């Protein structure tokens, strides 16, 4: 019963909240989407927290995603021990980076008065959940070998069963408590995501790489407003000033 | 030819009295809010001095503006696009709050609520960030009037070109000289803030060239803050969004001068429409430093030229707007008279706020400890200026001393011209020589005099009609959707995200 609640009900609630609330918030309150950077208030200590944290967490999450999308390939890759060690070490390094980062970030939030004044309750909850998640993750990587293989073999089928609405928790039941907690905590983070500053990650501005540097917005349709003038020979726009959105 | 309109500005530094009324007007209207206390969209700094934020001109520290590149395309000094995304977690060139100052208030209650005692109660300063007691280390205009001071003036980045002796002379008390430099966003033609914004939240309005940050699209990546070489975008530490001077567009759209222009006590501020050729922007950006001012001026088109008018109309610029451009005081100072120069054009953002360099403190000198503005030649010629021309050139013409000299000589000539007329103690010969030296005739000298000394509000501020009423009518699809990019008010309360 408890297992059903934690591994079936909680995930569905979490993911539903994630999708529905994120979209709702984006539509009704775009203003609240921000990195909420605190670098202006304190920069040096932030560097030692935020950089390792993001490299570590993005690396680790990418690893989880690859395992989820290509479990068979991962198992095949791990068939050769050297490759397995390389993969495991990489994962551990990312995990440790994230751990160093989040400790530095929490330390900074507690200690620097300026930063404390811009810390909300949700910020605190998020940091604690993330910290717990990373600790659990690193512990798993160290003591339950070899994570990349058993993740692909047992956790991924469970996650996929959720995705296809045929939840099958037989695979997770025998997992050690530490790992179970890691899974539950992950869904808690997903649930709190849309209510927290974590939404900043969905606005990663990739299109910046190909967008024209300059953005010019015309508030009116020039042709319609000044219809009497011909626009037939008006060019798209000059090289520098390109009409934006 | 792609003719566009820019609402452009001139500040006449010879008239600025450093009263900071402009800054207060702006603060009261726009930035008297949590998270914005430390922002001065309009600030007035003392030069020589380090300014606000400290040493903002030193791009080896802040990496603002553009750099000329061999391939003809200028690149941001911060690095290319990819570097912006790599540095997104921690921006290495972001100014810190202490480079501005930590905003503070005082615990005034203590003056009233303290128990009776042997000592007077005091109101101790409290930080507006943490709410805790603090020691004030700096504040707005901390270095006000401290020209010549070792801590501030000596660290002015514009001293780089001067020899140590030249620098030292400026710090002798008797020779000490300073003037005021009011600064707002320049609403540049090649804005570095826009180019650096990964979210694409910053944009230039096509119709009038005002540069705005869409608060709903800004994600607080704080790249614009470093990219603007003038440090005129600010990060609101409370809302997590960047903000900047909006040139009081709601006032402009209703035909009123921006708050800082309206309140200016010295009446130093001029505003008017400028037509420019957007097709030639790249040309103006690819010249060497000493040609920048000229190239910048070349972009500006004559609103009386029939070809320009025809092309302007094709681009949807209204006849009444063209009429306003003809009366633009900015056009006269910048293009016709060549007296107003862009600030630090070597940053290559093509700033559209121009400065008439200051003559008076530069010309005056001391004789046996007596402050003397007149000598046998009435005013000392600019070659004997107290503030080296090189210093002014570093500010206003990317090192090209000819441009600054010309602007000063013209002011000098107008002064002699009027002196002959009103007092009569200079000879016609001297006046003619001074006028000839800058190729000016009596009519022009009179016009410069009138626009400098006697202009009414309507002559100083000539706002081209903005036709916002028509623009609003165009928002026929979804007004709320358009609002973010059109710039009218808040749909949601500007509350910090969780
Ligand atoms: C997708 C790419 C991401 C980008 C571009 C990004 C960017 C940022 C930025 C700019 C900040 C503000 C740093 C500052 O204070 O100046 C930040 C903070 C933060 N990010 Fe990310 N982030 C990303 C992904 C993530 C992920 C995947 C997580 C965790 C699951 C995460 C968790 C956090 C947290 C907890 C903070 C707050 C740090 C603190 O000040 O205590 N971010 N991020
Ligand atoms: S002065 Fe700075 S903020 Fe203003 S338009 Fe230019 S680059 Fe942008
Ligand atoms: S109000 Fe005018 S005169 Fe006074 S400081 Fe500002 S710009 Fe100068």
Image (cartoon, helix red, strand yellow):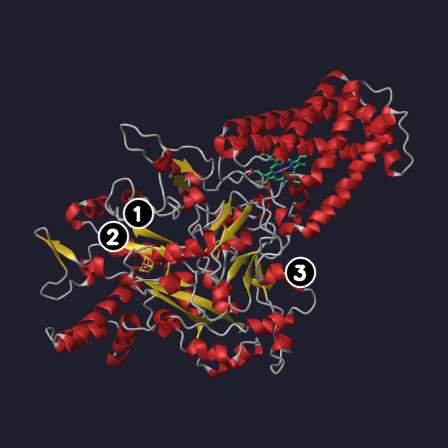
Q: Which disc is residue B481 wearing?
A: 3
Residue in the image at 36% along x and 62% along y: B263
Residues behind callouts 3 and 2 on a single chain: yes
Q: Which disc is residue B140 wearing?
A: none
- Determine the CA span between mark 1 and mark 3: 45 Å
Q: In this view, does B239 lie to the left or right of B413?
A: right
In the rendered image, the residue lying farthest to the left is: B368
Q: Position of residue B237 (x, y in %)?
A: 51, 42
Q: Is residue A240 left or right of residue B164?
A: right
Number of residues whose C-alpha sits closer than 10 Å to that of mark 3, classed few (under 14), some (14–19) or many (20 or more) = few
Residue in the image at 71% along x and 19% along y: A139
Q: Dots 1 and 3: beta carbons under 8 Å?
A: no
Dot 2 corresponds to which residue? B178
Number of residues whose C-alpha sits closer than 10 Å to that of mark 1, classed few (under 14), some (14–19) or many (20 or more) = many
Residue B414 versus residue B129 in the image, above or below = below
Dot 1 corresponds to which residue? B49
Q: Is mark 3 on a helix, strand or loop?
A: helix
**Along the line of sight, the residue nearer the viewer: B221 or B30:** B30
């Amino acid at each position: 019963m408890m297992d059903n609640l934690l591994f079936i009900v909680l995930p569905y609630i979490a993911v539903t909240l994630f999708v529905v609330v994120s979209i709702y918030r984006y539509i009704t309150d775009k203003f609240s989407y921000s990195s909420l950077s605190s670098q202006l208030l304190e920069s040096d200590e932030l560097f030692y927290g935020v950089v390792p944290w993001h490299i570590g967490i993005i690396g680790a999450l990418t690893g989880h995603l690859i395992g989820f999308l290509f479990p068979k390939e991962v198992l095949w890759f791990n068939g050769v021990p050297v490759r397995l060690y390389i993969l495991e070490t990489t994962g551990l390094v990312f995990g440790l980076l994230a751990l160093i980062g989040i400790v530095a970030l929490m330390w900074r939030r507690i200690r620097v008065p300026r930063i404390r004044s811009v810390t909300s309750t949700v910020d605190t909850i998020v940091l604690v959940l993330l910290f717990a998640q990373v600790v659990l993750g690193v512990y798993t990587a160290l003591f339950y070998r070899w994570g990349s293989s058993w993740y692909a073999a047992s956790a991924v089928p469970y996650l996929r069963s959720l995705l296809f609405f045929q939840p099958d928790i037989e695979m997770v039941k025998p997992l050690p408590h530490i790992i179970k907690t890691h899974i539950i905590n992950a869904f808690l983070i997903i649930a709190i995501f849309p209510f927290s500053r974590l939404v900043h990650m969905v606005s990663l501005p990739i299109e910046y790489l190909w967008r024209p540097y300059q953005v010019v917005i015309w508030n009116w349709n020039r042709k319609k407003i000044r219809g009497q003038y011909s626009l037939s020979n008006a060019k798209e726009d000059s090289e520098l000033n390109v009409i934006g959105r | 030819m792609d003719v566009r309109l820019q609402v452009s500005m001139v500040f006449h530094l010879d008239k600025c009295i450093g009263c900071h009324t402009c800054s207060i007007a702006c603060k009261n209207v726009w930035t008297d809010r949590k998270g914005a206390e430390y922002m001065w969209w309009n600030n007035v700094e003392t030069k020589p001095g380090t300014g606000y934020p400290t040493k903002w001109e030193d791009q080896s520290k802040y990496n603002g503006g553009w750099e000329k590149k061999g391939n003809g395309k200028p690149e941001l000094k911060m690095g290319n696009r990819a570097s912006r995304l790599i540095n997104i977690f921690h921006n290495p060139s972001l100014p810190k709050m202490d480079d501005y100052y930590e905003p503070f208030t005082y615990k005034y209650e203590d003056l009233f609520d303290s128990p009776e005692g042997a000592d007077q109660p005091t109101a101790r300063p409290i930080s507006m960030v943490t709410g805790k007691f603090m020691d004030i280390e700096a504040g707005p205009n901390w270095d006000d009037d401290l020209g010549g001071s070792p801590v501030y003036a000596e660290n002015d980045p514009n001293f780089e070109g001067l020899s140590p002796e030249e620098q030292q002379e400026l710090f002798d008390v008797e020779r000490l000289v300073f003037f005021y430099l009011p600064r707002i966003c320049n609403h540049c033609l090649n804005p570095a803030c826009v180019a650096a914004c990964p979210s694409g939240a910053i944009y230039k309005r096509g119709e009038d060239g005002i540069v705005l940050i869409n608060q709903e699209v800004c994600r607080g990546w704080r790249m614009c803050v470093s990219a603007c070489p003038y440090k005129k975008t600010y990060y609101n530490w409370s809302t997590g969004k960047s903000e900047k001077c909006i040139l009081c567009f709601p006032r402009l759209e209703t035909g009123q001068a921006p708050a800082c222009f309206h309140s200016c006590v010295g009446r130093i501020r001029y505003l008017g429409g400028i037509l420019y050729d957007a097709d030639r922007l790249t040309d103006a950006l690819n010249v060497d430093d000493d040609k920048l001012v000229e190239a910048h001026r070349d972009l500006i088109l004559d609103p009386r030229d029939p070809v320009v008018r025809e092309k302007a109309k094709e681009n949807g610029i209204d006849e009444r707007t063209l009429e306003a451009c003809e009366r633009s005081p900015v056009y006269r100072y910048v293009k016709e008279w060549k007296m107003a120069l862009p600030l630090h054009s070597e940053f290559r953002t093509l700033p559209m706020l121009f400065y008439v360099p200051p003559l008076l403190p530069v010309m005056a000198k001391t004789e046996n400890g007596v402050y003397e503005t007149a000598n046998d030649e009435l005013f000392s010629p600019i070659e004997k200026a107290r503030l080296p021309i090189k210093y002014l050139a570093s500010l206003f013409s990317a090192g090209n001393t000819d441009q600054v000299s010309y602007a000063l000589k013209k002011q000098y000539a107008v002064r002699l011209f009027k002196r002959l007329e009103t007092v009569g103690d200079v000879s016609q010969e001297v006046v003619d020589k001074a006028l000839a030296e800058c190729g000016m005739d009596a009519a022009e000298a009179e016009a410069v005099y009138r626009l400098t000394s006697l202009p009414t509000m309507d002559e100083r501020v000539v706002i081209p009609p903005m036709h916002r009423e028509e623009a609003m009518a165009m928002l026929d699809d979804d007004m709320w959707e358009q609002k973010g990019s059109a710039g009218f008010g808040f749909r949601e309360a500007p509350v910090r995200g969780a």
